Amino acid sequence: MAQAKVKAKADNGASLGFEAKLFQAADKMRSGVSPSEYKHIALGLIFLKYISDAFEAKYAELKEAGEDTEDKDEYLAENVFWVPKEARWSYLQANAKQPTIGKLIDNAMLSLEKDNASLKGVLPKEYAHPALSKTMLGELIDLFGKIDVGGDEAKAKDIFGRVYEYFLSEFAGAEGKRGGEFYTPRSVVNLLVNMLEPYKGRVYDPCCGSGGMFVQSERFVEGHGGRIGDIAVYGQEINHVTWRLAKMNLAVRGIDADIRWNSEGTFHKDEHPDLKADYILANPPFNVSDWGGERLREDKRWGYGMPPAGNANFAWVQHIIHHLSPGGYAGVVLANGSMSSNSSGEGEIRKALLDADLVDCMVALPGQLFYSTQIPVCLWFLARNKGKNGFRARKGEVLFIDARKVGHMVDRTLRDFSFTPGDPETDIVKIADIYHAWRGEKDAIKRRGKYEDIPGFCKSATLNEIKEHGYILTPGRYVGAADEEDDGEAFDDKMQRLTAQLAEQFTQSDELEQKIRENLAKVGYGF
């Protein structure tokens, strides 16, 4: 009996409901395959299902209009991938139980790359590997075949994009530290995007991983009445496998992006040397010690000091500043050491950045946000020209936000931020609104009022104040302690109550100590 199709329903950015069930069902089929290998198997098939569905929808439209359904240009003109017959989902599903299914999938991927130049070298082609269960492949095809979007192209992009992103996040969690190489947690990306607000212009990520920064940027634009083409996307990734994930991730979302790869990396072979971006969002690898800095000592990007050969943090910061347009803004995830380290000239670089008034805002994040590390990290927000877009200029000032206590634990090891667009009670909107109110933006002021320092949480500090702190940028140094609420109890009464409570606890402690001594004596270990 044929299984019923799953009717997917999107709802204002919320979970689709079936994503977790879909992943759990797919994960049960893994049968000994490691998450790092399995992600390519599963994500490749999700991608194939999406582009095949998009093709079939266009095919039906052309057929109804009496047009040539096999004219490749008809599809490419609508930014729909051309899917040859042997790569169409219906053909693969009809052969899902055949022992040759692995070879058929590989041939489908090869055909897609041949007929679509932008997919060349992107798609996985390891399905015919002898160690891979052909029964598992057939079951995965049947499972993903149940996703039904009813021929709605916009809905298909949203549904498959969310499924793809959910699978990425789950695989990142399963891979632990290695998962952080290709995936930045959604809450961190959402915070960056909602603080930078990339409505229009060029968006760049020099270490783009699987493309999450771009996906959330496009989602932000659409959520605020813009169009998916309002931003131009540029990126680079050193890991070829991760680059492939990014290309598929963006294609599923219908995002046209210039994402490039080379094995030398962004520092040594910058694929966008002349790009000046309006917004840069980046989560570079933390504290990289072998970045080859000694070979780049005279590089023009190091306008604020030569980064130490043993740590790439300030190489990333200066590379990003180099690529900012005259009015550009950047948000960068860095290890906490970047805020205070004075070793190997890092303190001097930080001083030069502050003296040039390039640092706009610093946010201290809590620990356990990342799959790859449990250590807390921070966000640097950089501005080429403070006060851009008519916002009140904050020249000579830096906003410090201490968000180390923000968020909630999803499980024993992972923390998350709450987020509902426009809701000032959710974590991400609260933090972003403080930043935008500080910059004098009307919408944020309307939601929360004019900016004011909040003891223990945020503080606007002048460069003179920062200089007094030795150019250290740790928010905790500036925001102070939160105000304690007066509980109305008189001091003498409180002290009498607390000392009585302490006396009772001392008595209980003495009784417990005596019992322990007696029990030890009973077994011959008295003292």
Image (cartoon, grey):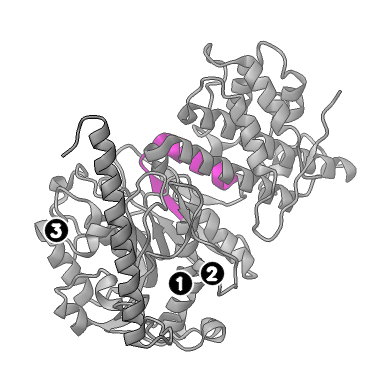
Q: Is residue 415 visible?
A: yes
Frontmost of labels 1 and 2 is 1
Q: Is residue 341 left or right of residue 210?
A: left
What residue does disc 1 label? 431
Q: For the N terminus, give its image quadrant.
A: top right
Which range of residues does the magenta coloring cover? 234-251
How far across and down, in percent of the image, does residue 231 sit? Answer: 53, 62
How far across and down, in percent of the image, does residue 491 sit? Answer: 33, 86
Could you give the CA–CA distance between mark 3 and mark 1, rounded to whole angstroms? Answer: 33 Å
Say which element carries label 3: loop
What residue does disc 2 label? 199
Q: Amino acid at mark 2?
A: Tyr
Which sits in the foreground, 522 or 312?
Answer: 522
Could you give the CA–CA distance between mark 1 and mark 2, rounded to whole angstroms? Answer: 19 Å
Q: Is residue 175 left or right of residue 238?
A: right
Could you give the CA–CA distance between mark 2 and mark 3, rounded to whole angstroms? Answer: 34 Å
Q: Amino acid at mark 3?
A: Met
Label 1 Cα neighbours within 10 Å, binned few <14 / some 14-19 / many ≥20: many
The residue under the point 36% across, 77% down is 497
How far across and down, in percent of the image, does residue 175 sit? Answer: 43, 35
Disc 1, disc 2: CB below 8 Å? Answer: no
Q: Amino acid at mark 1?
A: Ile
What residue does disc 3 label? 306
Label whose residue precedes the other's in the sequence (2 or 3): 2
Say which element carries label 2: loop
Label whose residue precedes the other's in the sequence (1 or 2): 2
Asked if residue 248 is among those painted magenta in the image, a careful observer would answer: yes
Frontmost of labels 3 and 1 is 1
